[in-house]
Image (tube, helix red, strand yellow):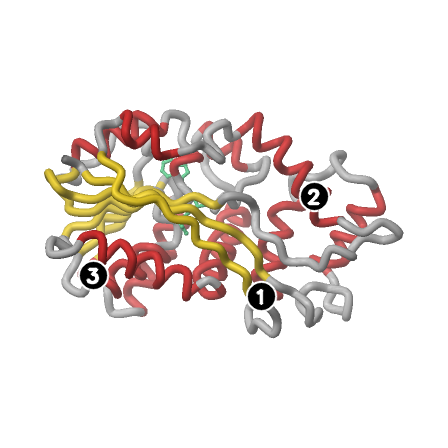
Amino acid sequence: MSHAEPSDSHRHQHHAEPEGEAAAMAELLDLDAEVLHSYLSGVTAWIRELAADQPGRRILDLGCGTGTGAFALLECFGDAEVTALDLSAALLHRLRDRARELGLADRVRAVQADLDAAWPEVGPVDLVWASASLHHLADPDRALARAFAVLRAGGLLAVIEMDSFPRFLPDDVGVGRPGLEARGHAALAAWQTQELPHLGSDWGPRLAGAGFIIEAERPFVIELTPPLPAAGRYARASLRRMRSGLDGHLSADDLSTLDTLIDSDGPDGVLRRDDISVRTTRTAWVARRP
Ligand SMILES: C[S@@+](CC[C@H](N)C(=O)[O-])C[C@H]1O[C@@H](n2cnc3c(N)ncnc32)[C@H](O)[C@@H]1O
């Protein structure tokens, strides 16, 4: 997923992350996994099938965030262990807490690492997973070359990226002018084109360029319709992230409507609306080191 908005440029410069920003990101990643749990179990089960008779025990999660992918993989790959790498100390802290809560602490090693800099000692591994993280890197091709180097021969790399920011609102939302969410997406996309040049990349050729053999490419189309228990909180967390980059890029009316949607506890806020859906597509590439 690209839960990216302008404050992500700080992360590119690898400054210390503000506490509130990390907490908001952690909430968003956890809600993402909660609301999209059937997608997450679907994609991990699919990778398990592709791994066939060599499922592997050593997994590397690149840009693990709060570990939602790592935990889904541990559930699917029964006797596996995960090394989870991320730049964010706060997200790794959350991952370790969650691992303890789930009784999985002995199967997860969380290590702070900048994937654009030197990697910690991790190889060899059977499976590398990179969900919504490669597009954040300054040099994803170098990361792919490193992923190739740490995989055993025959091991798999799974890359997952979100095709676009998820949609939550009915099309008619917008005071006097429907289509507020579409306008927000267009403004966000303009920013992302500049700041996250690898977002929306066709990763297949890039994986092949790093020496991998592409096993499969698969879109996962997600269309969840109401009623959805956690969708309001997920929509609020996502739209808040989107909103933080939109000052000056949307009309005052649109910004005020968006503020009501994300801040109000009243009937117009997404927490109380009963028409919140979740529409998004994620594409997964699975490639093998020959
Ligand atoms: C959109 S989140 C995805 C998190 C997780 N993979 C998931 O699917 O829930 C992107 C993650 O990449 C991490 N990240 C961004 N740049 C990074 C870098 N240079 N090195 C390591 N991690 C990085 C962020 O801290 C964040 O946790």
Question: Label 3 vs label 2: CA separation?
Answer: 39 Å
Q: Which mark is residue 231?
A: 1
Left or right: residue 108 compared with residue 66:
left
Q: Which mark is residue 61?
A: none
Can you identify the residue that label 2 sits on? 184
Q: Can residue 131 be seen at all in this image of the molecule?
A: no
The reply to whether the C-beta atoms of the residues labelled 2 and 1 are less than 8 Å apart is: no
Q: Which amino acid does the dot numbered 3 rest on?
A: Phe
Q: Is residue 164 above or below residue 145?
A: below
Question: Label 1 vs label 3: CA separation?
Answer: 28 Å
Q: Earlier in the sequence, mark 3 or mark 2?
A: 3
Q: Position of residue 61 (x, y in %)?
A: 28, 47
Left or right: residue 252 compared with residue 91:
right
Can you identify the residue that label 3 sits on? 77
Residue 66 location, quadrant: bottom left
The reply to whether the C-beta atoms of the residues labelled 3 and 2 are less than 8 Å apart is: no
